[in-house]
Image (cartoon, rainbow, N blue to C red):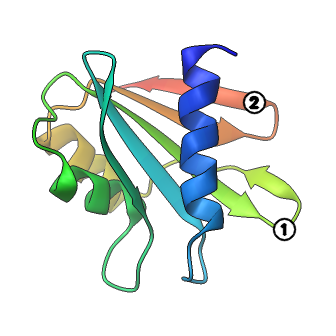
Amino acid sequence: MCKKLRMLNLARKKAKDCDYIYKLGAVIVHGGKIISIAKNTPNGHAEVNAIKQASRTEGADIYVVRHTPTGMAMSKPCENCMEAIRSAGIRRIYYTTRSGYHKVMV
């Protein structure tokens, strides 16, 4: 399994574990190492929670997954999360779509 799919699956597992109504998970990878894994909470979106937990985000990649009862769904970050991702210096976003994953350059 390729690295991107492994990271998306890890984010999916975190999302599946989420107690919040919207089940999202996020994984931040820097230099080939996982530096943060987070999920949605009533206090914050998975992307922002992962950024807060990470020790270093400049140049990192983020993987975002939304889990639904039927599997993975579209999980493009909202505008507030996109702004947080840009401010953190994250270089690439991978998120799930119905056809697999999609890469967005920031």
Horizontal placement of 74 versus 70: left or right?
Answer: left
Mark 1: few/some/many CA within 10 Å (<14, 14-19, 20+): few
Residue at left 54%, top 82%? Answer: 20
Rendered position, 29 above or below 41: above
**x and y percentages locating residue 81 in the rendered image:** 32, 56
Q: What residue type is disc 1 on? A: Pro
Quarter of the image that includes the C terminus: top left
Is residue 75 visible in this depiction of the protein? no
**x and y percentages locating residue 2 in the rendered image:** 63, 13
- Mark 1 touching mark 2, by CB under 8 A? no
Q: According to the image, label 2 marks what residue?
A: 100
**x and y percentages locating residue 64 in the rendered image:** 50, 45
Residue at left 56%, top 82%? Answer: 19
Give me the disc on residue 27.
Answer: none
Residue at left 18%, top 46%? Answer: 54
Mark positioned earlier in the residue sequence (1 or 2): 1
Which of the pair 46/87 is nearer the observer?
Answer: 46
Eye-nearest disc, 1 or 2: 1
Q: According to the image, label 1 marks what residue?
A: 69
